[in-house]
Amino acid sequence: MHRLNVTVAAVGRQWRLAARAATLVGLLFLAACTRTTSSEPQPGSYRAAVEIAAGKWVPFGLDVAQEERGTVLHVINGDERIRLDELKVGPGTLEARFPGYETVLQARVAGEELTGEVLLPRAGGKVARLPFKATLGATWRFFPDALPQNADVAGRWSVEFTGDGERREPGVATFEQSFERVTGTVQLPDADQRFLAGEVRDEELRLSRFDGGAAVLYEARLDEQGRLVGTSWSDRGEARRFVATRDADATIDAAALATRLRNPLEPFTFAFRDLDGKTVASSDPLFKDKVVLVTLAGSWCPNSHDEAALLVQLDRKYRARGLQIVSLMFEQHAEFEQAVQAVQRFRQAHGIQYPTLIAGEPDKAAAALPQLDAVAAFPTAIFIDRAGLVRSIQTGFAGPATGVQHDLLAHDFELQIEELLGSPAEPEATPATVAPVSP
C-alpha cells in the first residue's frame, strides 16, 4: 500500500510538472500570437494625418477592416469614404494604393500605431514624400475635447486668397455645422477643394482634406468683425492667407479663366495616341456625324476624377443616341508607357468605356491644342456639334462637394447634350457661345 501511495504521488508530481509545462507552452504560444497580431494592422478607426509643411499636419479618418479577401482601408473626409482594397500586408508593413491615382501609402505597423510615408507622384518623375502617422481608437479630427459653446460658421462665405507676390484669387466657401463638427468645401474659379471636414473650437476653425489626390489644411479664427481670417496650405507647398466674409449670395466670376477658340468657324480637330499606341483623330469614322464631348483631363487631378464620374453616366445614357465622349489625358509623365499606366488606373477606378488618349503633359496642353487660346484649368469640357464646330466650353468643374452647384452643372451638361443631339448635322447659324480670340 505504501508503495502504491508513492507511485500515485510520483505520478501526481509528474502530472503537475507536465501541466505547468503545458501552461508555459500555452503562454508562450499566446505571446507569440500577440506579437504576430501586433505587427498586423488592427481593425478599427484611426486618427491619421500627413505632414505637408513644417509642423502642419493634415488629419483625416482611416478605417481598417478585415474582409473575406483580406485587409481593406477606408479614407474618410466628412461624408466621403474612399475604399482602398489594393493592399500588400507583410510582417510589420502595410502598402496601399489609392484607386485611380498613382499615390501609395507605405507604413510600418507597431501595435495600434502606423507610421510611414505617403508618396505623391509629381511632374518630371519627382515624388512628394509626406510623413504619415495613424493611431487606433481616436475619432476626433483636430480637437480631442469639444467645448459646450462654439462659434457658428455654417453658411456661405465670400473668400479672398492672397498668395505669393500678393496675388489675389476669389473663392466661395460653404459650410455645414453640427455642434463642433464642420463639413463643406471651398470653390475656386477653376475648381473646388472637394470634401473638407474638421471642427470649430471656441473661435478657432480647422478644416482638412486628404483623398489620395491632394492634401489641404485650413486654419482660421473669427475676428471682431465676424470674418474668418486665416491661412491655407496644400501638398503643393503653397501657403495662402485668406479672409472670408459671410455672404449668402456669394458667387464666382470665372470669365477670366474661360478657354476660348481662336476661330469659332473652324472645326475642332485633334489626333493623339490611345492606350495601345494607335493614333485616334477627330476625322476618324468614330466621330463622324456624332455629337462629341471632348474633355481635357489628367489622372493626377482630383476634379478630373469628379468629372469622370459624371461622364461615365452620360456615356451610358447618350451613347446610343449619338454622343461620343473622348478624354484627352495630360499626364505628369513624359514617357508614354508611364502615362498609359496612370490612365489605366484612372479608367479602372471609374469604369470608363469611352476613349482616353495620351495628349501630353499638363504644361504643354496649350501647345498641343493650338486652336485654343489657352488651357487654364483641368478639366475643361468642349461641346462639339455634329458638324465638328464647338458650341460651348466649360472651364473647370464643380464636384459633388459643392452640392447644388454640382447638380446645376450636371444638369447643364445634359441640357447641352440634349440640344446638340436634336440639332441637324449642318448648323443653322454661327456658334454664339464661343467668342473669337485675337492672335
Image: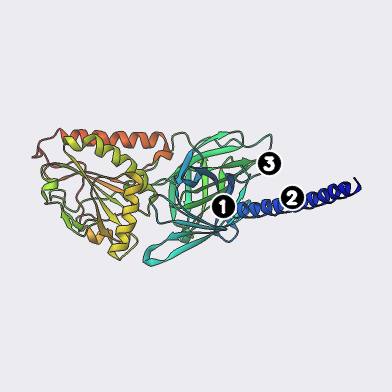
Write the residue at 58% across / 61% down: 54
- Amino acid carrying label 2: it is Thr
Q: Position of residue 25 (x, y in %)?
A: 71, 54
What distance separates the C-alpha of mark 2 from that of mark 3? 44 Å
Q: Is residue 20 left or right of residue 169?
A: right
Task: Report the front residue among 56 and 150.
Answer: 56
Q: Position of residue 286 (x, y in %)?
A: 14, 47
What distance separates the C-alpha of mark 3 from that of mark 1? 18 Å
- Return the mark for residue 23: 2
Q: Is residue 152 left or right of residue 395?
A: right
Badge 2 density bin: few <14, some 14–19, many ≥20, Cα 10 Å:
few
**Which of disc 1 and disc 3 is earlier in sequence?**
1
**Which of disc 3 and disc 2 is earlier in sequence?**
2
- Return the mark for residue 49: 1
Tag 3's secondary structure? loop
Q: Is residue 77 left or right of residue 12?
A: left
- Return the mark for residue 145: 3
Task: Examine the image and state in which quarter residue 332 appears.
Answer: bottom left
- Amino acid carrying label 3: it is Asp
Badge 3 density bin: few <14, some 14–19, many ≥20, Cα 10 Å:
few
Q: Position of residue 307 (x, y in %)?
A: 33, 44
Residues at badges 2 and 3 in contact (C-beta under 8 Å)? no
The answer to whether residue 273 is above or below residue 243 is: below
The nearer-to-camera label among 2 and 1 is 2
What distance separates the C-alpha of mark 2 from that of mark 1? 42 Å
Give the mark count.
3
Q: Is residue 369 visible?
A: yes
The nearer-to-camera label among 2 and 3 is 2
- Amino acid carrying label 1: it is Ala
Quadrant placement of the C terminus = bottom left
Q: Is residue 222 visible?
A: no
